[in-house]
Amino acid sequence: MAEKKFYITTPIFYPNAALHLGHAYVTTLSDIIARYHRLMGDRTYFLTGSDENAQTVVQGAKKAGEDIKPFRDRMVVGFVDLFKKLEISYDQFIRTSDEVVHWPGAQLLWQKMAEAGDIYRKEYEGLYCVGHEAFLTEKDLVEGKCPDHGTTPERLKEENYFFRLSKYTDQIKQKIESGELQILPETRKHEILSFLNEGLQDVSFSRPTNKVPVGIPVPGDDSQVMYVWCDALTNYITALGYGRGDETLYQEFWPVDVHVIGKDILRFHAAIWPAMLMSAGLALPKAILVHGMILSGGKKMSKTLGNVIDPHKLIEEYGVEALRYYLARHINPLEDGEITYEHFKEVYNADLVNGLGNLVARVMQLAQTHLSAPVAVEFVPYPEEYINPFSQFEINRAAEYVWGRIAALDARITAGAPFKVVKEDAEKGKVMIESLVRELAAIDLMLEPLMPATSKKVIEAIVANKKPENLFPRKE
Ligand code: MSP
């Protein structure tokens, strides 16, 4: 089979505060999918980054009493540090403040849209919500406030550039309906289609430079900077070298196989972004995977609401592998998911201490005691029950399958009692134990995308024929 390419992206994050578990979720989900594709032998490119030319970042700096640049740098150091801890295997971390990597491509795309006749000047008055980094309409508001952020939007009256989004309504609808641009899950596809049915409105695509202290200058007009979403969305192609001269990566990896995003930013990705690409004559994404929100106390976890769980805290207490496991198995990527400390602990003890950890200890204790040499493990093809869910991005179902195999192997040990058999018939017992080790190795191969460090420890134990140190200490 010919080698396939696979390009996957996360949203780029605002460096206005530290990341919380919701951000850790989308990044870990994407990482698991990326690792799975590498495991399948696909040439994989995994992109993440930070969305820096935003007013929310300017406000964050102000609140911290710092200058914008050092503040952003400090926030981004925190992002990279968290992603390292989370074992995020990205190939590139793009920063939209990077004038060398990002700006030329963003400006080139703008020029293409302008050449297509899709950019025009307009006097405009509207209500800008900094939390959304978008204009809202009166009917979006509840008692004059943005219902998501609880803030009163700023009334702006200015002349700026507009993007002819309305022109693309029907074309986008057609691409989504035909499945050429796949929106997953179905519920989100219907949501965006009914939004498109109302007809898209043109959007303000720039702001006056004297009002917004950050941003990419509009080509040919220094008095305006690009609207932050126009700037941010282009990261998915500028990261590949678009507009920078060397487009090797762009040629190889665009169009993207999947943009992983939260449902909060669906319209930007499934309406504005495809329209921008069409306007510039570029290929559209193949798929957009829209995950649900991590809830905390029944509400979307967010900095504004202050109900955040700090991923560092869970990592310190349970280790990063446990966090990855929880996010993979116990959050359905296609729905909203609640997380509590109590449930986390329960799952940790049940699935990791008593489940995986106990199984590895049992099998490797037998192997170490009764086998004189390590079992030679051969590659076994990945079962359909593992591959199929991944092709639908249902990593929770893939994880569930792996844990089914863990339980089955555990039951096999109990039923077959190799520890007894080996005392009565050494040869028969040895064969039994070898077969258990081979099954453990087969399970371990499937663990790699989910829990890379654990997967490595287990295979190392198998190769050394030695029971590893306790993988998951019990938590009381
Ligand atoms: N900068 C924009 C995205 C630009 S992409 C071209 C942005 N940034 S963000 O930092 O506010 O949030 C990024 C993403 O984090 C969200 O779209 C979503 O995918 C994820 N999450 C933020 N809060 C979340 C939860 N409570 N739960 C799950 N994911 C969440 O939006």
Image (cartoon, helix red, strand yellow):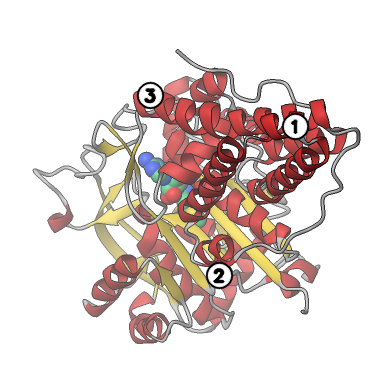
Residue at 79% x, 58% y: name it: 379
Identify the amino acid type marked 2. Trp
Residue 211 x, y percent position in the rendering: 41, 45
- Of callouts 1 and 3, which one flags the residue occurring earlier in the amino acid sequence? 3
> Which residue is identified by label 1?
424
Residue 428 x, y percent position in the rendering: 77, 42
In the rendered image, the residue lying farthest to the top is: 476
Residue 44 x, y percent position in the rendering: 71, 62
Please tell me which residue lies in front, 51 or 384: 384
Please tell me which residue lies in front, 393 or 152: 393
As drawn, 141 above or below 5: above
> Which residue is identified by label 3?
341
Please tell me which residue lies in front, 103 or 428: 428
**Left or right: 312 in relation to 468:** left
Say if mark 1 contacts mark 3, CB within 8 Å: no
Residue at 54% x, 63% y: name it: 385
Helix, strand or loop status at disc 1: helix
Does residue 156 show up? yes
Q: How many marks?
A: 3
- Of callouts 3 and 2, which one flags the residue occurring earlier in the amino acid sequence? 2
Q: Which mark is residue 463?
A: none
> Which residue is identified by label 2?
110
Identify the amino acid type marked 3. Tyr
As drawn, 410 above or below 113: above
Identify the amino acid type marked 1. Glu
As drawn, 58 above or below 439: above
